Amino acid sequence: MPITQIKVGSRKSPLALAQVLETRELFKQHQLPFDLKLVEFDTAGDKDKRTSLTESSVADDFFTDSLDQALLNGAIDLAIHSAKDLPKILRPGLKVYALTASVDETDCLVAARGMNAVSESATIGTSSEYRRQKILGIYPKAQTVDIRGTIQERIAKVDQGQIEAVIVATIALKRLGLEDRITEVLPWESTPLQGQLALVGRADKAHLLRPLEQIDLRARYGNVYLIGAGPGDPELITVKGRRLLGRADCVLYDFLVDERLLDFAPNAEKIYVGKRKGEHSRRQEEINSLIRQRAQMGKTVVRLKGGDPLIFGRGADEMRYLKDYHIPVEIIPGVSSTTAIPSLLGLPLTARDVASSVAFVTAHLSCENKQEAQNVIVPKADTLVYLMGLTKLHQIVSSLLKEGWSKDTPILIAARGTRPDQQVFSGTLEDILERARHQQLLPPSLIIVGNVIHFWKTYGLNQPAVLFTGTNPGQYQAFGEVLHLPMVELQEAVWGQQIQDRFVNTLKTCDAILLTSRFGVKYFFKKLSKCSLSKREVSQKPFWVIGDITAKELQDENIQPAVIANTATSEGLFSVIKEKTDLRGKNILFPRSVLPNPTLKKSLESLGARVTEIAVYENKKPDKRPLPDQPIQTIIFTSPSTVDHFLDDYQRIPEQWQIVAKGPKTAGHLKEKGYHCHALIQ
């Protein structure tokens, strides 16, 4: 292949010239058909070593301007840059032909010779605001000073005693043969593209420079898709979003995402990165890094985000981060909760003669001081929609009243909108705090303020609904719009050492484990995780379960039930067990709620089994809450305790409501209380 001589431009600093030598060696390794003739330049950043790089007046092309101009003038064919010096937007007519790999992306401290650490209150030089913030996180008492110049000039200030240490890129010291000056490698992720070289040429010279694509690291990158999962209901994801999930090698998903969507990515690695107030599974920096690492491995990465990826999330931050690394990213819009939830309720955010403007507001600022925490933004609009406002309801109401909104202004809260356990109630600015205090609301929530709520109460899709008193409303969507008012509150049982020992000893010796609900499964494994026995040991034992839902919960733990009763009653399970098993002498562990189940225990023991009951969870009555505003047509009770707790709070079941009972036991209990059951479900 003929060799073409090309003129390459570089800055004059020792580090820049070392990067030219590195590029020559890279060309040689890949047998690229170029002979490089070097032309050296001073950029604005080389001529001006006094201006702080943190000043807003510093041009984006501070370290590339003269090289960019030389390319456009035809004085050189190729410019070799430290990739992190590239401007965010190249001048028109220029193109990055290659980004090379970095052998070291870290930052390090350089202290005086002979020192292996710096003092807590050291004076540390850096020209980067990012590095300044990071080093103060490690050495909060340190003093940082702005410093400019070549690597050697900055280190000289350390050796002369002007400063105690300086922060530099580790790769810079390695390229200059100064590795012995590394005092401490710093533990943070460095700025994007650190250690990489960028080879830039004119876009119209692609015929000449195309061979450079052989050394372009970006050719091996995978694509990243920021996909909006919609407001909660998994059927509200877009067709394109669902299709791209099927192509994913890795899915990073949020707290707000319905996990059923993950079924559309059967072969993907799935990483939960959810964040909710006070509970962050990973910091945003970790999430960014995970996305980048997977993409740089060549994987197709889906970042699955609740709602729309660019509305009140960190989608913009993630997009900016990936763009800074030159990783291809595509945004797949999602159905935003800001409009979807009101629409599904039949609540118009604007309506003729009622509201002609709407504003969407986050109730949480990215960084709040005490004063900011007391106030919430109140835009000038007829309808206000606040997201993530459940814990800020008091501040929202207070801020609205301060801004002159009437105390009679209607306000509506929709918690977990579009989901089976959606809760909706309304009030006024005067009474909403008291009304909300009696609700057991779960995030996420949408808070709507304005006279459109009067419109909704008159004309909205406020049809008679189903009131569900159990814990799993998703199973009952066929009945209509389900309003969730749980009459039981489940939590892990509190054990002393004696019960813990009994649980472990019974587990070791039992012949079977009996589970009659999905909560029995959930809390059994919670208790198991705190014991000396492993799941692998326990999974060898036969599990007997009631119903498909309990079986599915067990299968999610990668354990297949030995016996499943399709009739989801104690009698149904006993019938199947006695057909398949000789119960004489069998030791059976029965993890259950604190509420007894004497029928099943007695039935099993009548055939010679020994049953050890241990309560793994408690079934408590929640605090009383107001009934929903919406008219109710049907109420579903799932257990005798849901009946008792409802009657304790509300004294009676309204005559016009149709009563549905789950299982004959619940129906019988309703009959004892004087109520006719209109339908029985298993």
Image (cartoon, rainbow, N blue to C red):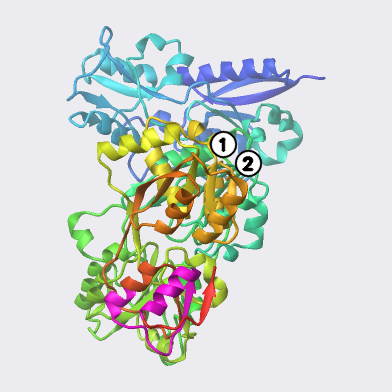
Whether residue 349 is visible, yes or no, is: yes
Which image quarter holds the N terminus?
Answer: top right
Q: Is 6 situated above or below 63?
A: above
Q: Is 33 situated above or below 272?
A: above
Label 1 belongs to which residue? Answer: 294
In the image, taking residue 167 as reference, residue 245 lies left or right, namely right
Q: Which one is closest to the eye, mark 2 or mark 1?
A: 2
Mark 2 lies on a secondary structure that is loop
**What is the magenta range?**
646-673
Q: Which sits in the foreground, 641 or 238? A: 641
Label 2 belongs to which residue? Answer: 249
**Residue 322: x %, y % from top left:** 52, 43
Q: Which sits in the foreground, 369 or 20? A: 369
Q: Amino acid at mark 2?
A: Asp
Whether residue 76 is visible, yes or no, is: no
* Residue 402 occupies quadrant: bottom left
In the image, taking residue 334 as reference, residue 144 lies left or right, namely left
The question of residue 654 being in magenta is answered with: yes
Residue at image position (56%, 40%) is: 326
Q: Amino acid at mark 1?
A: Arg
Q: Earlier in the sequence, mark 2 or mark 1?
A: 2
**Residue 581: x %, y % from top left:** 59, 45
| Mark 1 neighbour density, 10 Å: few (under 14) some (14–19) many (20 or more) | some
